[in-house]
Image: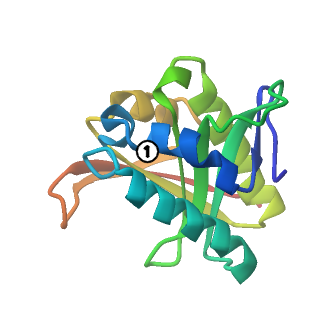
Amino acid sequence: MYFETEHLYTRRFEVEDLEDFHEMQSNNNVMKYIIGRGKTKTENSNELLEIINSYSENNTDRLILAISEINDEIRTLIGACAVAKSENGEFEVGYRFSERYWGKGYGSEILKGLLKFCLNDLAIDKVISIVEKKNIYSVKILENSPMQFIREYEEEDTNNIVRLYRLEKSV
């Protein structure tokens, strides 16, 4: 386990997560603002193996974690969260959940835990999050978080309007 919140905990992905991972990643609604479509079983299988293999690489630029509910002894995968170093050296946080877990407040809960994990456990001084403006539920979560809205801009590669949020560790 990496960190936990009131209802959730994070852990490493396992091969046994493939069916739940595929359910989440193949859902067009879940992936709408990520790549615009659900992924195929082959894409998901390859991605899951890549994530699992990344744990042994001691890569400090990217950490992808599975999310499960604390009261679930089966360790069902309900979502994923990540911390990744961006091209300009900032650490970006993100998360997603299987659609059947939407509307439970888990987005706000995992973001709060993820920010605390980054600032305290990983000793990162500044964390960002970038979200498509049309993704109104994620925008609302960020607006209600300790992260500050920085600016809105058009992404070069997608032409989507995105919003940038940042949280800096207080000295």
Q: Residue at x 64, y 47 (%)?
A: 17
Residue 107 place in picture, x, y as percent: 57, 32
Looking at the image, residue 32 lies above or below residue 117:
above
Question: Does any portion of residue 147 appear in the rendered image?
Answer: no
Residue that sits furthest to the left in the current view: 159
Looking at the image, residue 8 lies above or below residue 48:
above
Residue 2 place in picture, x, y as percent: 81, 53
Mark 1 element type: helix
Q: Is residue 9 left or right of residue 35?
A: right
Q: Is residue 6 left or right of residue 140?
A: right
Q: Residue at x 59, y 46 (%)?
A: 80
Q: Looking at the image, which is closer to me, 87 or 171?
A: 87
Q: Is residue 162 left or right of residue 149?
A: left
Question: Does any portion of residue 126 appear in the rendered image?
Answer: yes
Hey, what amino acid is under mark 1? Gln
Q: Residue at x 56, y 23 (%)?
A: 101
Q: Looking at the image, which is closer to me, 8 or 124?
A: 8
Q: Name the residue tied to disc 1.
A: 25
Q: Residue at x 49, y 58 (%)?
A: 45
